[in-house]
Image (cartoon, rainbow, N blue to C red):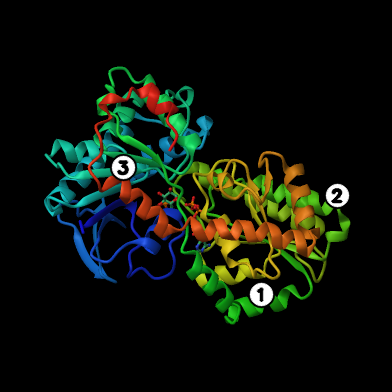
Amino acid sequence: MARLVVVSNRVPMPTERGPRAGGLAIALADALRPGSLWFGWSGRRSARTDHQPTMQEAGGVTYATIDLSETDYRLFYAGYSNGALWPLLHYRLGLVDYRTEEYEGYRAVNRRFAACIAPLLRPDDLVWVHDYHLIPLGQELRARGVRNRIGFFLHTPFVPPELVYALPQANEVLASFCAYDVVGFHTLGYRAAFLACMQAVPGIEPQRMPRVIVDPIGIDADGFAAMAAESLRGAEARRMKASLAARSLAIGVDRLDYSKGLVNRFEAFARLLAKYPQHRRRVSFLQVAPRSREDLGAYQALRQQLDRVVGDTNGQYSEFDWTPLRYMTRTVARRTLAGFYRIARVGVVTPLRDGLNLVAKEFIAAQDPDDPGVLVLSRFAGAADELTEALIVNPFNADEIAEAMHTAFTMGIAERRSRHAKLRARVHESTAARYCERFLSHLAPPLPAAGSQRVSELAAQAI
Ligand code: ADP
Ligand code: G6P
């Protein structure tokens, strides 16, 4: 079997203490086959920017990482990747902060990644590149003579041409997708938006188009369910359970990111307490929101805003023996997280936009099928395409989220079981392993030439 070479900016280093929040690294780590090589950023900033990666082995997987310089970090990671592409791909044009030198830094790091990876490749390796940090990597590898099959998967949404063209280098970035054999997205909608953008790029011949597939990511559902059941024996979950007494818990778990809709969610919880006083003292909300990308102004502003909203809500509704909203900004062990999901009566996943959202799947997998909690899910999370029996809400409408929380807290056992059974079946079917198998089945075999298909036909083609 061909060796798999995964490339992503963030690598879940096996030696790193504690969990690293972020869907990509977690889902792939759940599904990576032994013998694979994983290349990416070490997470460190240093002056050591030669082309010699540090190699480490764990669980049969070799991890090859390089450091970024301070300038790389500023231009490539904080700059173009997270200051321009991330907000753009999450429909937040107002937050796109773009500078030409950042695009140059972005291209330079992609070139350096290619220079480091090319000498490590064997002729029949399958190369699988992940996410918006590395869109031009395929092109840079091809420029170095790499002939291997190379696939790319985007973990964010994709946006229509009207938005993409806010990016001054839109044509260049879009054209660089043509270096890949396969390009994957979480949903049909993202794929359609991508194809519409590709049609708008001047001079792209149909035979240069990659194969474009839909392949929603998943979790290790069996493993996570077992961990959730088991973890209730953990000391932290026991403490949590005891502190809740007879109260019902709603839970949110998200990186502290403006795409996650946290302000509206907290506002919705306050409206729930205002409109339905019967929930006061009986329910509480736990939000776990590990800090993320803290060097960026938009993230610092969000944190301040959330501190204020949490303070206001708790100030208004707290009692001597009841704090309505608990808010933690650190990462917690996956096992503990699994236990909290299981204890929770309601899972609140209300991003304003989200590529897929693994938390929604983790919440479902963690429930006790005999007495399951209810998922409130944003219509703008990719996972809403699959998890249709959740209570689907418009995340911009705090009143609607509040109503859904009320429905969830008061839902009878029969309806909870019936919704959960369907959701659970889907989460156990569309796993991390299945995601990898599906992508690799498209990447591995020789593909028929796409030359016979026009770009417009590709746009209409269903998977
Ligand atoms: P994103 O990739 O945008 O962060 P996802 O919901 O797809 O969003 O993935 C987030 C992942 O990070 C999930 O697997 C979730 O369990 C994990 N995670 C989020 N918050 C924490 C935390 N505080 N501690 C540990 N893991 C976390
Ligand atoms: C999202 C992105 C990933 C990223 C993760 C954590 O899941 O799709 O590419 O790794 O967030 O963000 P960070 O900036 O810490 O890598």
Q: The N terminus lies in which quarter of the figure?
A: bottom left
Q: Is residue 351 left or right of residue 148?
A: right
Determine which residue is flagged by label 1.
Answer: 240
User: Pointer 2 and pointer 1: residues touching (CB < 8 Å)?
Assistant: no
Question: Regarding mark 2 in the picture, which secondary structure is present there?
Answer: helix
Q: The C terminus lies in which quarter of the figure?
A: top left
Q: Give how far apart the Cα atoms at labels 3 and 2 are.
A: 47 Å
Rendering coords of residue 205 (x, y %): 27, 21
User: Pointer 3 and pointer 1: residues touching (CB < 8 Å)?
Assistant: no
Q: Is residue 303 left or right of residue 117?
A: right
Toward which corner of the image does residue 40 lie, by quadrant? Answer: bottom left
Question: Regarding mark 1 in the picture, which secondary structure is present there?
Answer: helix
Toward which corner of the image does residue 400 lie, by quadrant? Answer: top right
Rendering coords of residue 89 (x, y %): 46, 36
Instruction: Tell me the amino acid under the disc marked 3.
Output: Leu
Visible residue check, residue 325: no
Rendering coords of residue 387 (x, y %): 60, 50
Instruction: Tell me the amino acid under the disc marked 2.
Output: Lys
Q: Is residue 348 left or right of residue 149?
A: right
Which label sits on residue 275?
2
Which label sits on residue 134?
3
